[in-house]
Image (spheres, rainbow, N blue to C red):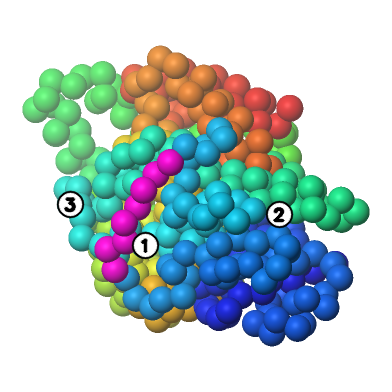
Amino acid sequence: MKLLIYTHKITPRVKYVFKHICTRVLGVQIEFTSVVEEFIAHQGLKISYTKQPLGNELFIQSHYLLFEDGVSDIEILIKNWSNTKCFFPCGSRSSLPFDIFAASFYLLSRYEEYLPYVADDFGRFPPEESIAYKYHFLKSPVVDVWAYEFKAILQEQFTNYEFPIKEFELKPIIDVPVAYKYLHKGIVRAIGGTLKDLVGFNFTEIYDRFLVLFKLRKDPYDTFKWLVNNHKKRQLKPVFFFLLGDYTVYDKSINYQNKHFVSLIKSVADYFEVGLKGSYLALDDKEVLKEEKQRFEAIFNKPLMHTKNSFSKLKLPLVYRNLIDLEITSDYTMGYVSEAGFRAGTCTPFYFYDLDYEMQTPLKINSFCVLDYVFRKKINASAEIKSLIDAVKKVNGTFNLVVHNYTFSEDDQWKGWKKTYIELLDYSTK
């Protein structure tokens, strides 16, 4: 049975956000109509989304946001609602006190990132500029929470309808900016690294380097077998992202033609999905990204599907348009590097909506909630991440957790993270 939605004007924005909330979050198929007679005659699930109710139906008063084009400076008034917060309040006749569809569109489209803001040192949109951070709901997947509030009123009105059950999923994202700390970097980089350590009197580093180079100790960043085994054991499906860009001041990966590096990538791909970690220079240059894509596809002889940007740098809409032009269908860059939370307000994968062209694109966005750097030095890291996992479990969403291969190296800054990570995996899968 489909949910029939009456609205006075069926716009791309209306179709986009109703599809996300009703179908992707709640699993309910939908249809639209702007014909009053058709709506009144319909006997199944139905709601009206317009300015005034047609009769005594389930009615949600619409905000003007979904019926306009372009971007303007919209007044946002945040209010408490049940155990969450929301904006775009409705009148007393509305079945919901807020227009959750307009509010969700504002967050999903990253509307605020098209408005003027103060960027960080890397040109990124910082969490402090977002309304979610300013009004303390960044750590809640509010779009999904609102969707379940909507589900509750539908269940109350249509008691015979059985809603599909969606299950919680943990999706580890393994970021590999450099596969090895010492190995396979060439003689020039090995000598340069040793000289740098000598100048800095870092004799422990010199000692470790030579133990690895002479095969007396495993390279500390080579944690791939450990990662593969622990994810296989728990039947999880992580995605690994490998950097194939040229060596620059920003990116210091292994040469993409190194046979050991290529062999590593292929061995990981035998078990899990792999994608391209776009280099820093590729973020603003489509030709550089195209070359890195070709390198990836030459290894696998199949199209590149997944990407994640270096430094989690994301400038809308340019970066996503470049991915679309290169026929890349899935990106994992959306998130913050300095704060945990839900940048787009959701824990359900969604599609990029281009506000300039007013259209849903085919690029699927997998927004991450946690980046390991945020919790690197926190004593209570495990407890804080578990609370975020709990928030996603309540709405049966997808918890995207970004870690790096060197997170499990047991370097001083990452001591204990192997244990913490296993604890989080087990907590998520129990």
Residue 192 location, x and y as percent? 17, 41
CA gap between label 2 and label 1 equals 23 Å
In this picture, residue 24 sits left or right of residue 412: right
CA gap between label 3 and label 1 equals 15 Å
Q: Which residues are magenta?
A: 72-79
Relative vertical location of residue 404 with respect to residue 69 in this rendering, above or below? above
Q: Mark 2 sits on what residue?
A: 26
Q: Which mark is residue 111?
A: 1
Residue 378 location, x and y as percent? 38, 20
Task: Depth check: give the residue in front, 389 or 313.
Answer: 389
> Residue at point 60% right, 22% down?
423
Q: Earlier in the sequence, mark 3 or mark 1?
A: 1
Relative vertical location of residue 274 with respect to residue 1 in this rendering, above or below? above
Does residue 429 appear in the picture of this structure? yes
Callout 3 amino acid = Val
Q: Nearer the viewer, mark 3 or mark 2?
A: 2
Label 2 near label 3: C-beta < 8 Å? no
Picture quadrant where residue 69 is located: bottom left
Label 1 near label 3: C-beta < 8 Å? no
Classed neighbour count for the residue bearing mark 2: other residues with Cα under 10 Å, few (<14), some (14–19), many (≥20): many
Secondary structure, mark 2, is loop
Residue 35 location, x and y as percent? 69, 84
Q: Which mark is residue 69?
A: none
Q: Which mark is residue 118?
A: 3
For the C terminus, the quadrant is top right
Callout 2 amino acid = Leu
Callout 1 amino acid = Tyr
Classed neighbour count for the residue bearing mark 1: other residues with Cα under 10 Å, few (<14), some (14–19), many (≥20): many
Residue 159 location, x and y as percent? 87, 51
Secondary structure, mark 3, is loop
Picture quadrant where residue 61 is located: bottom right
Secondary structure, mark 1, is helix
